[in-house]
Structures are given as structure tokens and as C-alpha cells.
Amino acid sequence: MLRVLMVYFSGTGITRFFASLIQEEMEKRGYICDNLNLEEVVDLPTLWQKNPVALNYTIRAERKRPLGKYPWPYQSLSSAMHSVKENPNLSGLREKWQDYDLIGFGSPVYGFRPAPVMIRFLLDLPVFRKKTRAFSFATHDGAQGDFEVFMRKLLKLKGFKYVGHIDHSFIYSATAIMRSNFNHLKTGRLLAKKAFKARKNIFVFLEYIHSLYYGIPYAYKGTNLLDKLVGIPYRLFYSYGIDFILNHLLFGFGLHTDECIRCMTCIQQCPQGLIELDDDDYPVRHYHCMYCLRCLNWCPTNALYFSNLTKNKARFPGPEVLLEAAMQDSIDERLKKD
Ligand SMILES: Cc1cc2nc3c(=O)[nH]c(=O)nc-3n(C[C@H](O)[C@H](O)[C@H](O)COP(=O)(O)O)c2cc1C
Ligand code: SF4
Ligand code: SF4
């Protein structure tokens, strides 16, 4: 019986949802599959802050518009990749995870790369000398860029035998925070449709995984050249688009103080641990972040915003709420017909 572990980071909940679909499909095949949010494995803010690594969009934003009262703290991804060291606090994971036949690492795509907190975690892992098999998985909005290449590099660096990658494009969860109106029912229906397609993808991927252990394995090829070429214009557009949105429209950290109930949810939710209390006990952020959007989405009163574009706008409620809306609607329709 195959024992699989999946470890993921998720901002708005889509990667968590994808991980649960993969887990369900694995369990249907009789695999034992443990699914862990990265925050259950490590204290993420402490891990990331000890050696913060940032993607280019954060670095550019900080250069153009330093937020802070503190000095520039981040290391770029390329220099982080050149100074890989095992973190002694994580060395126990090698023994803890030694009974798994396969380990999957998943993250949303941020600026064509894995989320910085996932990168930090992978760089800090001990080297897995027994050539444990590993795969990567991702969710995105259609342009995953070099995500797979980076995951392959990182996992090989840590001694894993990299066996493949699976990704899926779901719904534009990140743009909800810029819309005046976010239709739960419509988006819930779309998510259900996408989940159906995702299951088909997962089926094909698991056929391949199954062949590695029980059949005639075939070599994993990765993204083919044609896909890469077709993706170039989209990538350019996405790359400049994301940079523009993040650096000109999203940057900053604003608060409607009259609406803030000082519940600390934003502080507890920040995976980078960047939100603190100011002298009046209101949340404040002194650095640019990776924009995972959790603080905005889970603030119960919508008191937080990043810029005027996100002021008093909709928030993303998470995949479960959307699916619930779609399910309730189809029950209501059926009852009406009956
Ligand atoms: C800061 C940021 C950067 C993003 N960059 C990309 C990107 O480069 N390509 C892409 O296709 N989607 C991009 N997205 C969209 C996310 O990958 C997508 O919404 C993902 O499903 C979110 O997963 P999560 O809910 O697990 O956080 C980005 C989203 C954010 C918030
Ligand atoms: S989550 Fe919202 S209400 Fe709660 S402390 Fe943060 S800003 Fe204030
Ligand atoms: S400040 Fe908000 S958007 Fe930025 S990393 Fe923290 S929770 Fe995510």
C-alpha cells in the first residue's frame, strides 16, 4: 500500500482545495494519504523571518516605495538558492517522514514561482539521502511560468528523486479583492466545474504515479517545448501585469480604524508574521509582503485594504463557502421542481 504525504501552502484556499481533491483520488485507489498544511509542520513566520526570501515583485516594490521604519531585510530568490543550508530545527523531519513512499509539495504560483514561504521551507529542509520520491503541485490563473523548474531544482537539491508535477488553473481568487461585486453562486458553479476537470487531470497523473511503483515506469518529461512557446506572450503580459498591479495598485497597508474590532485575526493569519500592533493597538505592516491576501480576506469587518483599489471592495470567502452556495442553489432548484 502506497503511503503518500502532501505538504502545501495556500493563501486564499485554492491550493488547499486542490490538495484535498488529490487526497480523495489517492484514497479511492487505496493509498494512505496524509495531507498537511505547511503551518502544521513548522512555525512559518519564525522560519521565514529568520532568513526572509522574497520574489522580484516584493523587492521591486520595496525599492520603489520603501514602507518601513526598518532596514531592507529580504534576500532574493537567486541568492537564496546559492546559499542553501540545512536548518537544524527541521532535521527531525527526515526521520519523521522516512516511511512515506512519496511526498508532494504544493503552493500557489506567485509571479511564476512558488510562494516564498514554501521556498524558505524547502531550502531549510535536511537532505533526504534515501532518494525518497517527490512531486510538486500548484494552482494558478493560467501562467505558472518557472514554477515546476524551481520545484524540481529545490527538491533535487534536497536529495529527493523528483518524479513529476501536477497543476490546475481554478478561479481568479486573487482578483476578488478588487471587485465591487463578487458573485458567490456564479463563482461556486465555476469552481465545481473546474474541480471536475481537475479530477480528470489527477486521474491521469495518478495513473503515471501508479506505473512508477506497480507497472512499467515511463520517463517524466515535464512541460513540452510547444507549451513553453505558446505561453511566452501570455507570460510577458502576466509578468508586466502582475508587477504593475502589485507595485502600483496593491502596495501599502491601510486601515479603517473605526471598523477594526482589534480581533487580531490578520496578525494570526499572516504566514510571514509581518503584521504587528502599533502604539494604539491597531494592526500595521512595516514591510512589503508576498500578497497572499489572507489578512484582507479573513478580516471579519473588511477594515483592511492595501490601496484605494481594494478599499471597500469584495473579499474572497474561500472555496468551501462558494461550493456551499452552488450546492444550496441546486437543492433549492430541485425542491422548486418537486
Ligand atoms: C501575489 C500573487 C501573484 C500571483 N502570480 C501568479 C502568476 O504568476 N501566474 C498565475 O497564473 N497566477 C498567479 N496568481 C494567482 C494564484 O496563483 C491563484 O489565484 C492561486 O490559485 C491561489 O492559490 P491559493 O488560494 O492557494 O493561494 C498570483 C496570485 C497572487 C496573490
Ligand atoms: S482582522 Fe480586521 S478587525 Fe481584526 S484586527 Fe485585523 S484589521 Fe482589525
Ligand atoms: S500581510 Fe497580508 S497579504 Fe501580506 S503576507 Fe501577510 S497575510 Fe499575506
Image (tube, rainbow, N blue to C red):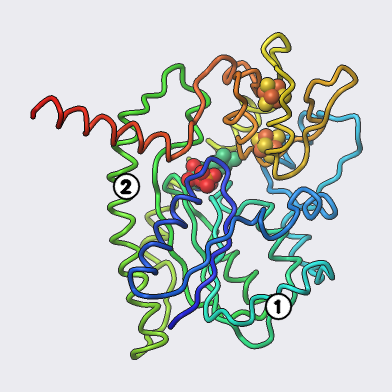
Q: Quadrant of ligand 3?
A: top right
Secondary structure type for disc 1: helix
Which numbered circle lies on residue 189? none
Q: Up-down: is 319 above or below 307?
A: below
Q: Residue at x 48, y 31 (%)?
A: 317
- Under mark 2, the amino acid is Lys
- Under mark 1, the amino acid is Arg
- Read off the residue under disc 1: 94
- Read off the residue under disc 2: 194
Marked residue nearer the N-terminal end (1 or 2):
1
Residue 94 found in image quarter: bottom right
Q: Up-down: is 290 above or below 220?
A: above
Q: Residue at x 38, y 87 (%)?
A: 217
Q: Nearer the viewer, residue 112 or 300?
A: 300
What is the crowding at mark 2: few (fewer than 14 residues within 10 Å), some, or many (at least 20)? some
Residue 7 found in image quarter: bottom right
